Image: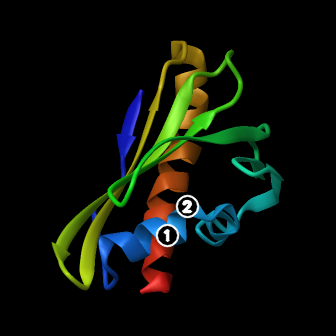
């Protein structure tokens, strides 16, 4: 399953966006309103709970400063990741795209597609608040 949020133009350089997104406490600020719980569990790990969903455990994965940050599932049973791709427009603005990629059976895909789509779209929209 692959879901991509619409690109957002951010009035910050790619490095500024990267620096913002690499800090796990800032991820909470990007979450939807139906966030029930958010906890940083280590230097590179966190979990959160959205209404109607189980806990989502993430660990910071592959990072390519200042253009890409990946948060991946820390649970082998549910292989997926959420990535932010940061592309420069000029020295003071960037385009950011959030995408979700996961390998699930059809039943799980049907249950999570709508909440995950809402999650990454909201993350992209809320990133505008940092501009």
Few, some or many residues within 10 Å of mark 2 (<14, 14–19, 20+): some
Q: Position of residue 24 (x, y in %)?
A: 66, 61
Labelled pair 1, 2 in contact (Cβ < 8 Å): yes
Q: Position of residue 71 (x, y in %)?
A: 56, 43
Q: Position of residue 12 (x, y in %)?
A: 34, 82
Question: Which quadrant would the N terminus be assigned to in this image?
Answer: top left
Question: Which quadrant would the C terminus be assigned to in this image?
Answer: bottom left
Q: Which residue is mark 1?
A: 19
Q: Quadrant of residue 31?
A: bottom right
| Front residue of 10 and 59 | 59
Taking the spot 49% from the left edge, 84% from the top edge, the residue there is: 129
Q: CA distance from mark 1 to mark 2?
A: 5 Å
Q: Is residue 13 left or right of residue 129?
A: left
Q: Residue furthest front?
A: 65
Task: Answer yes or no: is residue 41 visible.
Answer: yes
Q: Which mark is residue 22?
A: 2
């Amino acid at each position: 399953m692959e879901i991509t949020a619409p690109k957002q133009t951010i009035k910050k350089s790619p490095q500024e966006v990267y620096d913002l997104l690499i800090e796990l406490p800032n991820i909470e600020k990007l979450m939807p309103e139906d966030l029930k719980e958010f906890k940083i569990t280590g230097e590179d790990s966190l979990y959160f709970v959205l209404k109607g969903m189980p806990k989502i455990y993430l660990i910071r994965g592959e990072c390519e400063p200042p253009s890409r940050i990946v948060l991946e599932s820390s649970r082998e049973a549910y292989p997926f990741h959420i990535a932010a791709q940061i592309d420069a427009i000029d020295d003071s603005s960037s385009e950011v795209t959030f995408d979700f990629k996961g390998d699930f059976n059809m039943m799980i895909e049907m249950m999570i597609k709508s909440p995950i789509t809402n999650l990454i779209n909201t993350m992209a929209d809320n990133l505008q608040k940092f501009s």
